[in-house]
Amino acid sequence: MSSGVAVNPECLTRYQELKLKKKIKYIIFTLNKTFTEIIVEKSSDDADYDKFITDLPETECRWAIYDFDFEKKDAGKRNKLVFYSWSPDDAKIKQKMVFASSRDALKRSLDGIAAEIQGTDYSEISHESVLDKVNRGA
């Protein structure tokens, strides 16, 4: 089910900078105040995964893309574009519903995503959890 929200063109521009130009490491997306458009909340070139995690609010939903680097045994360095659906348990019900129904609009507009992580608490998006998921698909 789609909520009918639009994806702001800046979302695609920033995504291309991450994907093709490798100028940024992650992007965090949110909805505007009227819940009618998906917008870029933040992008960063900081490669510290813990910094990325702290940029996801404890009580509000977000989506994110992270350019995840890792080592695969006997295969060397790899990287995967990971899409995050962040919906913490303490988020408001209306926000959770709108974010859940708007996710596909954003995800469909971003080609080349290798893995998707859905998180309701920080343990589900820990580096180890994501590493395990991307390793299985690498």
Image: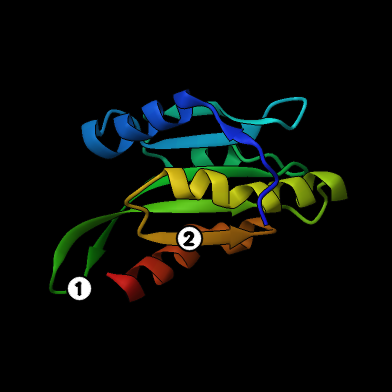
Q: CA distance from mark 1 to mark 2?
A: 22 Å
Q: In this image, 39 relative to 99: left or right?
A: left
- Number of marks in picture: 2
Q: Which mark is residue 48?
A: none
Mark 2 nearby-residue class (10 Å; few <14, some 14–19, many ≥20): some
x 69%, y 26%: residue: 32
Question: Mark 1 highlights which residue?
Answer: 73
Q: Earlier in the sequence, mark 1 or mark 2?
A: 1
x and y, in percent, of residue 69 in the image: 29, 52
Q: Amino acid at mark 2?
A: Glu
x and y, in percent, of residue 119 in the image: 63, 59
Q: Which mark is residue 116?
A: 2
x and y, in percent, of residue 91 in the image: 81, 47
Q: Nearer the viewer, residue 46 or 14?
A: 14
Disc 1 and disc 2 in contact, CB within 8 angstroms? no
Is residue 48 shown to the viewer in this render?
Answer: yes
Is residue 92 shown to the viewer in this render?
Answer: no
Q: Amino acid at mark 1?
A: Lys
Work out which residue is located at the far right of the displayed protein and give it.
93
Quadrant of the rendered image containing residue 114 = bottom left
Q: Is residue 24 above or below residue 113?
A: above
Under tag 1, what secondary structure?
loop
